[in-house]
Image (cartoon, grey):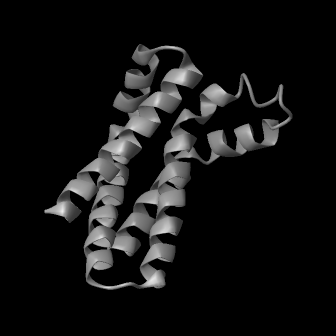
Amino acid sequence: MKSYLSGLIGSLGLISFYFITMRLLAGSWASAFSQFKQLWYFMLPLSLGFGIQVGLYTNLRSKMKNNTSKGMMAGSTATSTLGMIACCAHHLTDILPIIGLSAVSVFLINYQIPLLVIGILSNIIGIL
């Protein structure tokens, strides 16, 4: 039961991270929900896969102490988070050039969909 709860918290946590980031970058909750509506078919599998991995990791961790699962979880977490950030990237174009990171902004905008797909695929690999 603990692993199910951990998975649910992980999945909701990633979605919450997305909405909070979008709210801060876009300036309104309406923009955050509008963007989510446009990309929900990427966001839901990404957060669901992440939640499943958190649940599996919690279950495995309770059964054994293995650093390999920690590494896989960390890698997938980073990919999922990067995928979520890529969705918000077009709002960063207003800020990143000011702080000298315009190349990062352009990269995230140009590769938004591939980053989301890579995030989903890495979740599938992590689950398997």
Q: Residue at x 34, y 38 (%)?
A: 40
- Left or right: 45 as drawn, with respect to 118: left
Residue at 43% over, 27% down: 35
The x and y percentages for residue 21 are: 52, 31
Q: Quadrant of residue 4?
A: bottom left
> As displayed, is residue 65 above or below residue 16?
below
Vertical order, 61 against 50 (above or below): below
Q: Quadrant location of the N terminus?
A: bottom left
Residue 88 image position (x, y, % from top left)? 55, 34
User: Up-down: is 83 above or below 53?
Assistant: above
Residue 79 horizontal/vertical position (percent): 52, 59
**Residue 30 vs residue 106, the one in the foreground:** 30
Residue 94 placement (x, y as % from top left): 72, 22
Whether residue 128 is visible, yes or no, is: no
Q: Is residue 94 above or below residue 126?
A: above
Total numbered labels: 0
Q: Residue drawn at (81%, 29%), measured in percent from left and top?
A: 97
Which image quadrant for residue 128? bottom left
The extreme right residue here reads 100
Q: Residue at x 29, y 53 (%)?
A: 48
Residue at the extreme left of the image, as rendered: 1
Front residue (pair 6, 103): 6
The answer to whether residue 29 of the structure is visible from this angle is yes
| Residue 105 falls left or right of residue 51 | right
Question: Is residue 110 left or right of 85 when viewed as pictured?
Answer: right
